[in-house]
Amino acid sequence: MHKLLASTYKEFLLLTRDLGGLAILFLMPILLVITITIIQDGTFKTLNETKIPVLWVDNDRGETAENIYQNLAKVNTLELIQKTSENEAKELVFKGDYQLAIVIPENLSRDLDRKVDENVRGMLAKFGLNEDSISLAKTSNSQKEVRLYFDPATQYTFKSSIKNGIDKMIAKVETQRIYKAFQEQVTDDPNEVIFDTEPFVTFKEIGPDNNEKAVLPNSTQHNIPAWTLFAIFFIILPLSINMVQEKNQGTFVRLRTNPISYATVLGGKTLVYLCVSMLQFGLMLVLGVYLFPNIGLPKLDVSGKIPLLFIVAFFAGLAAIGLGLLLGTIAKSQEQSAPFGATFVVILAALGGVWVPVFAMPVFMQTLSKLSPMNWGLEAFYDVFLRNVGLGDLLPEISLLFLFFVATAFIAIVYNERKNAV
Amino acid sequence: MIQIKQLSKKYKGTEKFSVSGLDLNIDEQEIFGLLGPNGAGKTTLISMLSSLIKPTSGSFTINGLTYRENKKELKQFIGIVPQEYALYPSLTAFENLAYFGSTYNLKGKYLKQKILDHLEILGLQNFANKKISTFSGGMKRRINLIASILHEPKVLFLDEPTVGVDVQSKNVIINHLKKLNNAGTTMIYTSHHLNEAEDFCSRVAIIDNGKIICKGKPAILVSEQPDARNLEDVFLAITGKALRDYA
């Protein structure tokens, strides 16, 4: 125990004497989280507040086009700009001035009315309700095409959500037109309400809060856990460099001849760097709660979650330190440990879902992501922040993180023993 | 005190044995000098005796103990003054010594007093709280020595303990080592300073190509070599004048 405490104190001194290293450990994660959150907050605002200008070319000038226009105008995120020429709209979009142009074809309303009337009358005739049915002959209505011009740089998700939205609106307009046609056929009183045209099935998004209030994750809730975890894992760099320096300085050689076990030496490093991780995490929470609201970013909601958050941070820190100990044990030079450590953390972060959500990855990568300790940590943080789980529900993830630490530290010790066996 | 039997070491990827079938007995309280040109095998031998590298074959005991069976006990029994400054540059002299002392289970006031005493003996009492990075080569050598003797080892391995230091520092180091030897410490010492070795060692062995070519008391070795006035003449006569560059 005395040797462990002495090793811990030595590590503390080494760390506090390296001001550059300390700055990297604390300031860089702060900069990282603030930068990424501001950028991502812009994306969230794009979806929620900022209006995307969309060109609107109405070649129909009928009720259907008007209906679609009114529905699109209700969408907060879109700002419709009317254009008269399809070519002009197309050119503007392809130049990158606009992300989207919607072109409504000529005679859409007229042809839709005709098609619906034909179908309704045909159907009523089958039931023997329409005396004109025998004389009905189908007019040749070619399919109508609403043309969408997208800027090639437009993101796939935006494209697909716009296409789905317009598709849904047209389907709604068609349905309402069908109801109207039926109404015209069965009653002469246009004010008589026969059909309720409002959607029967609606959706409600229910969050995991006790009061079933929908949780709408903001950029802070996404970024603080993800990028704090990233920062925690970046600890493998200074840790492994610290170990490589010990080898280069000759102090590691001295320690090998002294009656102190490698596990004790690693234990001292673990305790100090674990404190660093916890401080980093605490600092991130302080940023999210106190600084972010003052710089126009959403506030981090940590109410009632702090103990669980620190438990997750503790085990995530351990996992990162285990990796750092292993890398520092194996690496022979800083040229080996620094680039490898940095690249490996980025790979783990990518696999873990820090940038792209795991569900959006290819199946093979989704399987691989389950092997990333950053994925376990991120899931545990999301569990606490967004899913309101208890400690019991976190056990699988924090157990994996702990086992990862045990495994990496064990491999480091065995590797060192084998390499230096006498 | 130290019995070495047929000890050999061949590094991976090399053809040549760095130490080859070496037999040697070193008595208690001896100062035994290992002399030889660059690449002769001196550091390899000390590294094996201090548990830093594993022998390819052969065996040795120190006070009847082996690393295989008595690793912890043996590490407490010996001290190593490595050729490099094995110190943390950003820590002070006191902090370095306190840490290395604590690895030998020294603690509290006893450890503090031990450090202060040694610093005073080696003329560094005014530099206890200065960082090692600000020290001269000679000062670092002295701290390097203190870090290895705080626990009062019975056997001390010294791998070129005075290399690159000024005459004053060398004098202080050698005098302190002599005092430790008088107090009962057995020493195994390597150096290229043959005059220093002649004066300091009770017995020397000249090693070349991993083998002991000759061994004995310095004065006897000098007297047995025709035309030799000192140990350096003996050394050159035995190992030759050809350069020993190796990579």
Image: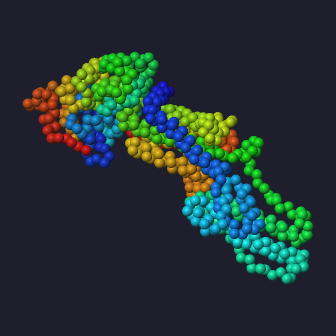
Q: x and y percent of residue A297 in the render? A: 62, 41
Q: x and y percent of residue A153 in the render? A: 56, 60
Count of numbered marks: 0
Residue A94 seen in render:
yes
Residue A267 seen in render:
no
In front here: B202 or A385? A385
In front here: A23 or A333? A23
Residue depicted at 68% across the width and 44% down the height: A387
Q: x and y percent of residue B45 in the render? A: 29, 35
In front here: B12 or A49? A49
* Image position of A316 (left or right of B3): right
Which quadrant of the rendered structure holds the C terminus of chain A? top left
Residue at the extreme bottom: A135
Q: x and y percent of residue B48 in the render? A: 32, 36
Residue at the extreme front: A84
Q: Quadrant of residue B159?
A: top left
Residue depicted at 15% across the width and 26% down the height: B220
* Image position of B134 (left or right of A326): left
Q: Quadrant of residue A186?
A: bottom right
Does A166 appear above or below B30?
Answer: below
Residue depicted at 62% across the width and 41% down the height: A296
Q: Quadrant of residue B148?
A: top left
Residue at the extreme left: B227
Residue depicted at 43% across the width and 46% down the height: A339
In front here: B44 or A146? A146
* Image position of A95 (left or right of A251): right
Does B86 appear above or below A133?
Answer: above
